[in-house]
Image (cartoon, rainbow, N blue to C red):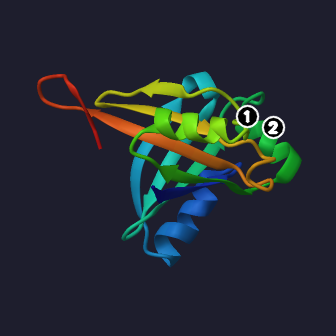
Amino acid sequence: MQIDHIGIACADAAQFLELYCTLMNGNIGQKTKYEEMGLDSTFINFNDTKIELLEPFETNSVISKFLDQRGNGLHHISFKVENIEAFYDRINKTGHEFLHEIRTIHEINKVKKYTFLSLRVSNNIMIEVFEEIIKNEGNAYEKL
């Protein structure tokens, strides 16, 4: 398990791009529009980690609600695991909870499975846990 990225909720990602790209020498990475979640995701890459800017485009999205309650700032810390189902089962057996079941996002060349630990478990800090599986040239999936 390793920390993959830190998610920042922001009303206007452009303000944060100035900070992270110009002042902190980050590079803009993958940009994704998540229609079903009402948000845009922009990754800023650094040497061995990333920051994900989460900007809502729907007023009823989870990120819009987060911003209404807390304003711009830390949304989550994301850990990459090799087997999310095994992690999920292990944590459930301890009696701890997740915010939701494992969810799956299908992208062009990969599948991301993810969930968040319950805020009671993580002392009120959003903790995302995910696994990425890439599609190889023969359209078979391989774990990253």
Quadrant of the drawing holding the C terminus? top left
Residue 23 seen in this snapshot: yes
Circle 1/circle 2 CB separation < 8 Å: yes
Q: Which mark is residue 81?
A: none
Look at 44% across and 43% down and name the residue there.
31
Which residue has dot 2 on it? 65
Mark 1, Cα crowd under 10 Å, few <14 / some 14-19 / many 20+, is: some
Residue depicted at x 79% and y 43%: 66
| Residue 64 position within the rendered picture, expressed as x and y whole percent measured from the top left | 76, 38
Q: Is residue 42 shown left or right of residue 8?
A: left
Left-right relation of 135 to 63: left
Is residue 32 visible in the rendered image? The answer is no
Name the amino acid type tagged 1: Val
Secondary structure of the residue carrying tag 1 is helix
Task: Please tell me whether residue 69 is drawn above or below residue 28 in the rendered image.
Answer: above
Q: Amino acid at mark 2?
A: Lys
Identify the image quadrant of residue 142.
Answer: top left
Circle 2: element type? helix
Distance from Cα at disc 1 to Cα at disc 2: 5 Å
Query: Where in the figure is residue 51, as x and y percent of width and height?
Result: 52, 59
Q: Please, which residue is most extreme toward the front here?
A: 93
- The residue sitting at 36% across, 71% down in the picture is 47
Looking at the picture, does residue 62 appear above or below residue 120?
above
Q: Indicate which disc residue 62 carries.
A: 1
The picture places residue 125, in percent across and down from the top left corner, at 74, 55
* For residue 31, above or below residue 58: below
Q: Relative to 44, is 137 on the left or the right? A: left
